[in-house]
Image (cartoon, helix red, strand yellow):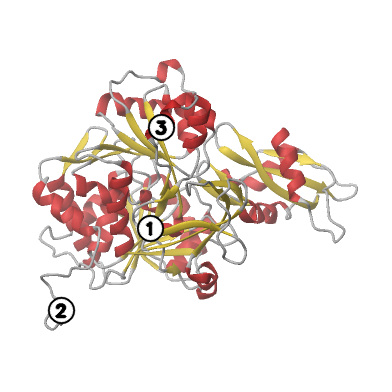
Amino acid sequence: MDETGLDKCAANFVPLTPLSHLQRAASIFATREALVYGNQRLTYADYHRRVTQLASALNKAGVGKGDVVATILPNIPAQSEAAFAVPACGAILNTINTRLDVDTVAYILAHGEAKVVLVDSQFLPMTMDAIDQMDAPAPMIIEVPDDVAGIKGIGTQQDYEDFLQTGDPQYRWVMPDDEWDSLALNYTSGTTGRPKGVVYHHRGAYLMTMGTPISWELPLFLRYLQIVPLFHCNGWNHTWMLPALGGTAICCRDISAGAIYDAIADKGVTHFGGAPIVLNMIVNAKDDMRRDFDHVVEVFTAGAPPAPATLSAIGKLGFNIKQVYGLTETYGHVTECIWQAEYATLPEQDQAAIKAQQGVAMPMMEDVTVVDDQMTQVPRDGTTQGEIVMRGNSVMKGYLKNPEATAEAFAGGYFHSEDLAIQHENGAIQISDRAKDIIISGGENISSVEVEGALMHHPAVNLCAVVAKPDDKWGEVPCAFIELKEGAAATEPEIISFTRERLAGFKTPKTVVFQELPKTSTGKIQKFELRSLAKKM
């Protein structure tokens, strides 16, 4: 076929970007609720105007194409506004985990070269301490008070609403010239030491916003409760997705069973995502926290394999759970457990076991499978273990300033998850173990190496090993096995307190066992024995 004259042009080719969704929603869903927080309501027209003003204000403050704007915010409206406003001025969004310690925040701000940082008043003192530790130029700070939560501004930095007013509501958004342009910078939980900067592009995020509604069978005008932290894979990209459906984001600063039930009963929540810890919270809620509601609430769960017993229990309370799986490097969830009609005839325990599987590739992915060390497909026998690998448009560009790690992650033309799994006959993946001893606690990755490094600073510690201990609330928690120096003494509370001074609270061991550590003939600690002990505690 002669294709002369069949060229790409402005009429037939537009770089894919999730920014398009809010541009469209501001026109066709102008009067519908976009954001709800407490008694605050923003229509899509309001949302778009505030995003535009924030983008303009950032631009006037010197932020341009390729610059990084960081946020240290909980799930409040300013975080959703920044999700669109930062890329709308051509910049790259860096959402920082509010649970991190000062040293790690300082590293991220410096490594990412943040030019501006939007900070919730609660986290401003910590942020100032982090900036004091930086060897790089300090970012401009915008303080974001939270009147709904009763958190008043400290007043030593530029106020968010005042800063917003400096922006032009007629500002023209900077849309990407290339859909490969960087959209967001997200840092891993540091499972091998320092966190790595994962770079997203506009194309990958846009396709996430297209694939998720297909997999989740989402309707127009859903009411979505923001439980997944927006600093975690940009809230699984759901913030960018909602305007495409005219959906309402209901902000939730502090997650509790009572807050979830209230949002469902009072604000009509129809959907939310969350780690298994959230499911446990709902199942174990006290009677005075529970509220009646008259519809089924659809839930995506990810972060750690949920216990079948939890899935069985929550299903009886009016929640339909769908297991998904992904990583920071894949924009969030990229596999799903597809429910087949014939499963409904199985015993309840078998149904729950199927729902606990991580499943198959979602539509925006090209391939997700399990391979051996030679990159050969493992038998789909539900027994043979291998590594989960994946390829597709919703895989990161790479790790910022780390070409070696990027090349290693993409070896063989696939992204290597370093998660170990089996694969069933129907292609469904089921995680069987975690490579490199990663501990997943409440959806957060914890490096055993990092915790061990902190413990080894204690003067009484000779050797130590940290493994995952099963926990009903968090899924897994760190358990430390410590071999003391001869003649030295220490107590469990002392060790826990010592570690808490050096690491974020969620990384601190919850159990400490003093004993001689099992070792190989070459002196290597045999962690598999310790994991077995931890499971029996």
Q: Is residue 135 left or right of residue 9?
A: right
**Residue in the foreground of this view, choosing between 95 and 183:** 183
On the rendered image, what quadrant is the N terminus found in? bottom left
The kind of residue on which mark 1 rests is Met
Q: What's the distance in space between the residues labelled 3 and 2, CA to CA?
A: 48 Å
Q: Which residue is mark 2?
A: 7
The kind of residue on which mark 2 rests is Asp
Using the rendered view, name the quadrant where residue 150 is placed.
top left
Q: Earlier in the sequence, mark 3 or mark 1?
A: 3
As drawn, the label of residue 365 is 1
On the rendered image, what quadrant is the C terminus found in? top right
As drawn, the label of residue 342 is 3
Local crowd size for mark 2, using a 10 Å CA cut-off: few (<14), some (14–19), many (≥20): few
* Residue 7 coordinates in the image, percent (x, y): 15, 79
Q: What's the distance in space between the residues labelled 3 and 1, CA to CA?
A: 26 Å
Q: Is residue 116 above or below residue 433?
A: below
